Image (cartoon, rainbow, N blue to C red):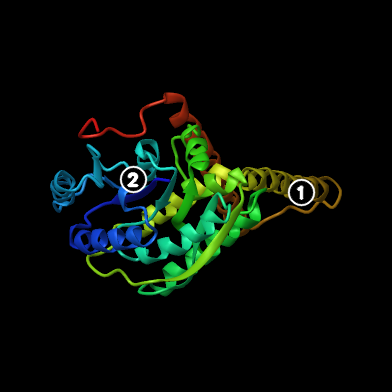
Amino acid sequence: MMISVIIPVFNELQNLNELITRLTQSINKIGLTDSSEILFIDDNSTDGTYEYLSERSQKNNQIKVLGFTRNFGHQTALYAGLEHCKGDFAVIMDGDLQDPPELIEQLYSHYKSGYKVVNAKRTKRKGETFLKKTTAVIFYRFLKKTTSFDIPVDTGDFRLIDRSVIEHLKNMSEQNKYIRGQIAWLGLKTTEVEYVREERKYGKTSFSYSKMFRFAMDGITSFSDVPIRLVTFLGLFFFGVSALIIFYALYSYFYLERYITGWTSLIISTMFIGGIQLLCIGIIGQYISRMDKNLRKRPFYVLKNND
């Protein structure tokens, strides 16, 4: 058995030495030291992360590094790791020390019991703001309710997956990657291990609220057609309302000989319906944008090296 540990990194220079040390110790505990690889995917860092990892890889054959020519994003980095890893199974984790390498032993224990996917479920998220925790709770539960398959809540990308899962993921050609959703979509035998997600030890997160929003949109538009059905419902609802208003206006004019006045109500209703229309166009645009990117068939990423 060979294990691959896949770690996307972006400006994580301060964390790398401790991370590699703890990873090596964890791999030693499960007895796979001689059949393991630690694969880092650098998303075009600017703090010397790629250079440091390249130097470490020259001294340690266990460490491998891929470098992007520009910032292609966290999920694309994960996908690059999946394409290049050689293990019979892989552990996916972040490089900021919030995902404890020591948990690999428990993940591996469940994997040996026959599970194809072993998720690491967060029971507590230290060091995160109330807003970030709240939006995460809302998003994951909304996504779970609007999909036709079971997406685990309170679970990030930290998990162990079998080689069969990796091969399925490599065959999924959509440009907007949402790896955790794709794994859940497969419906393979899954279990979970609970852990406390620690506060980030060094540096600052690069996962801004704007990136979180784009990530959430990728998740929703990849696996749910509820937004499109909502657009249809809103269209039918406001068509019915407008038909009633038109009928009432004509009835008042011809039969009651009463004229409808009130510019304020007219402007308010016009602005409201106009806002709904723009929202619907935006939702439809998200789906069209995804189709456009997939039709272009551009490479998912470009590497600095040819490893």
SS label for mark 1: helix
Report the Cα–Cα distance between label 2 and label 1.
54 Å
Residue 158 higher or lower than 288, as above or below: below
Q: Which numbered marker is on residue 167?
A: none
Residue at coordinates 46% horizontally, 29% vertically from top-left? 294
Q: Is residue 263 visible?
A: no
Query: Looking at this rendering, what residue extends furthest in the right direction?
Result: 255
Residue at coordinates 31% horizontally, 64% vertically from top-left? 97
Among the two numbered marks 2 and 1 on one chain, the one whose residue lies closer to the N terminus:
2
Left/right placement of residue 181 relative to residue 51 reads right
Query: Measured from the top left, where is residue 50 in percent x and y?
Result: 18, 47
| Mark nearer the viewer, 2 or 1 | 2
Which residue is under mark 2?
73
Query: Measured from the top left, where is residue 117 in percent x and y?
Result: 53, 52
Q: Which numbered marker is on residue 249?
A: 1
Q: Amino acid at mark 1?
A: Ala
Residue contact between numbered discs 2 and 1, judged by CB atoms under 8 Å? no
Left/right placement of residue 145 relative to residue 104 reads right
Quadrant for the C terminus in the image: top left
In depth, the one of 42 and 70 nearer the eye is 42
In depth, the one of 247 and 179 nearer the eye is 179
Callout 2: few (<14), some (14-19), or many (20+) C-alpha neighbours within 10 Å?
some
In depth, the one of 267 and 60 nearer the eye is 60
Callout 1: few (<14), some (14-19), or many (20+) C-alpha neighbours within 10 Å?
some
Query: Measured from the top left, where is residue 303 in percent x and y?
Result: 25, 34
User: Residue 16 occupies which quadrant of the picture?
Assistant: bottom left
Q: Amino acid at mark 2?
A: Gly
Residue 300 higher or lower than 210, as above or below: above
Left/right placement of residue 304 relative to residue 127 reads left
Residue at coordinates 16% horizontally, 50% vertically from top-left? 56
SS label for mark 2: loop
